[in-house]
Image: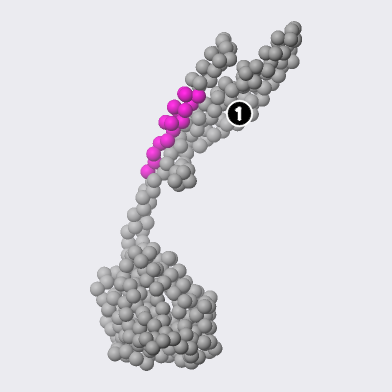
């Protein structure tokens, strides 16, 4: 809490800090005069030596330092410390985006680190974190499709839902058409000027009730732009499959229908990408992020609360204490 307070402190008249430059002169002058007086003293008796070690002599510099502290408080007060409160208003047109992610068994292949699905989840979360002004949702598909998270601006909930994605949630298979159709349906009633689906898969359409060409036409009818991403290398590695019958391992064959994915992207105004490793997958999402920019106008208002009053009171209190010590305790009258 103290850090947050100090972090927001600004000074309305910072040039008053230049007054601190006189402090070395004041300190030098005080001790120089004090040493000259001590050097000029003539010790006339043993009682004078005894008095030199008394409480009064040892602490006789306290009034001087209290006066410096009071002066410091006054300089800080003159610099006008303020706490800044910022209010940000966002106006404009955001983009509604559905992340359509393949969760079939082949997505657990380990040609990505640690596998395709976990790599896809990571870049999806990074993408969400870079889109604070947009409504984003998630649709997953395998042998069927399912809305993992509807369109939302609550990105904390959205990221939590992405993290829960895993193989085995749906019947195995690759229903690209159903996944795309469900994604478009999530955007059907959207009032956003720009509606986007980012469809990621590593296979060919082999199941589902809606074929990809029909889903593409539905996307065109609702003016939804589709970016398609094919993931996987020729050396896929082992894949761990989870199903209702149990867990097994297989060596998936990479058979991405690039022609179909390119056709969907081209006819809806999007673009097709091919990812062969974690780095290229991250760059693809970064490129899409740059191409689909929200048109937002951000206006920030700053309010300031003056904080010099306590410093003025502190300076007055220190001067009173200094005067009491000087004229009562140490008994130095004019």
In terms of secondary structure, what is the magenta stretch mainly?
Answer: helix
Which structural element holds mark 1?
Answer: helix
Residue 266 x/y as whole percent: 39, 84
Residue 153, percent from left and from top: 33, 65
Q: Position of residue 274 (x, y in %)?
A: 48, 83
Q: Residue furthest left?
A: 189
Q: Is residue 124 above or below residue 328?
A: below
**Residue 227 versus residue 24 in the image, above or below:** below
Residue 160 is situated, as x and y percent measured from the top left of the image, at 39, 68
Q: Is residue 316 magenta?
A: yes
> Magenta segment, which residues?
303-318
Whether residue 228 is visible, yes or no, is no
Residue 300 shown left or right of residue 44 in the figure: left
Q: Name the outermost residue toward the top.
A: 44
Nearest the viewer among 300 and 238 is 238
Is residue 6 shown to the viewer in this render? yes
Which is nearer the eye, 17 or 255? Answer: 255
Judge whether 179 appears above or below 125 on screen: below
Give the side of residue 310 with respect to residue 178, left or right. right
Q: Tell me, yes or no, whether the highlighted magenta stretch contains residue 241.
A: no
Of residues 20 and 144, which is closer to you in this image? 144
Q: Residues within 10 Å of mark 1 (few under 14, many from 20)?
A: few
**Residue at 69% across, 15% down:** 52
Q: Residue at x 44, y 81 (%)?
A: 229
Q: Which residue is labeled 1 in the image?
A: 23
Apparent side of residue 225 relative to residue 275 in the rendered image (left or right): left
Determine the residue located farthest toward the front in the rendered image. Answer: 246
Which quarter of the picture shows residue 24?
A: top right
Question: Closest to the observer: 62 or 257?
Answer: 62
Quarter in which the C terminus is drawn? top right
183 vs 95: above or below: below
> In the image, what residue occupies the spot 51% across and 17% down?
324
């Amino acid at each position: 809490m103290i850090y947050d307070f100090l972090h927001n402190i600004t000074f309305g008249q910072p040039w008053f800090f230049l007054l601190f430059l006189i402090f070395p002169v004041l300190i030098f002058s005080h001790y120089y005069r004090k040493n000259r007086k001590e050097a000029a003293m003539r010790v006339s008796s043993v009682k004078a030596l005894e008095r030199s070690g008394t409480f009064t002599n040892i602490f006789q510099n306290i009034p001087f330092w209290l006066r410096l502290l009071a002066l410091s408080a006054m300089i800080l007060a003159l610099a006008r410390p303020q706490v800044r409160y910022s209010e940000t208003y966002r106006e404009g047109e955001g983009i509604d985006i559905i992340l359509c992610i393949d969760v079939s068994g082949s997505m657990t292949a380990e040609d990505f680190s640690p596998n395709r699905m976990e790599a896809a989840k990571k870049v999806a979360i990074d993408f969400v974190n870079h889109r604070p002004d947009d409504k984003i949702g998630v649709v997953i598909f395998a042998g069927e499709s399912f809305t993992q998270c509807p369109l939302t601006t609550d990105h904390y909930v959205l990221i939590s839902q992405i993290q829960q994605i895993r193989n085995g949630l749906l019947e195995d298979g690759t229903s690209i058409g159903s996944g795309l159709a469900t994604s478009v349906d999530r955007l059907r009633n959207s009032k956003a000027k720009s509606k986007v689906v980012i469809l990621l898969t590593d296979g060919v359409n082999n199941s589902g009730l809606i074929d990809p060409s029909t889903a593409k036409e539905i996307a065109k009818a609702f003016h939804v732009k589709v970016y398609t991403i094919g993931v996987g290398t020729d050396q896929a590695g082992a894949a761990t499959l989870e199903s209702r019958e149990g867990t097994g391992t297989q060596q998936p064959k990479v058979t991405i229908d690039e022609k179909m994915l390119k056709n969907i992207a081209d006819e809806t105004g999007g673009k097709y990408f091919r990812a062969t490793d974690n780095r290229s997958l991250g760059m693809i999402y970064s490129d899409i992020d740059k191409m689909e920019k929200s048109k937002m106008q951000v206006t920030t208002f700053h309010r300031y609360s003056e904080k010099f009053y306590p410093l003025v009171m502190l300076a007055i209190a220190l001067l009173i204490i200094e005067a009491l010590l000087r004229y009562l305790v140490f008994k130095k009258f004019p």
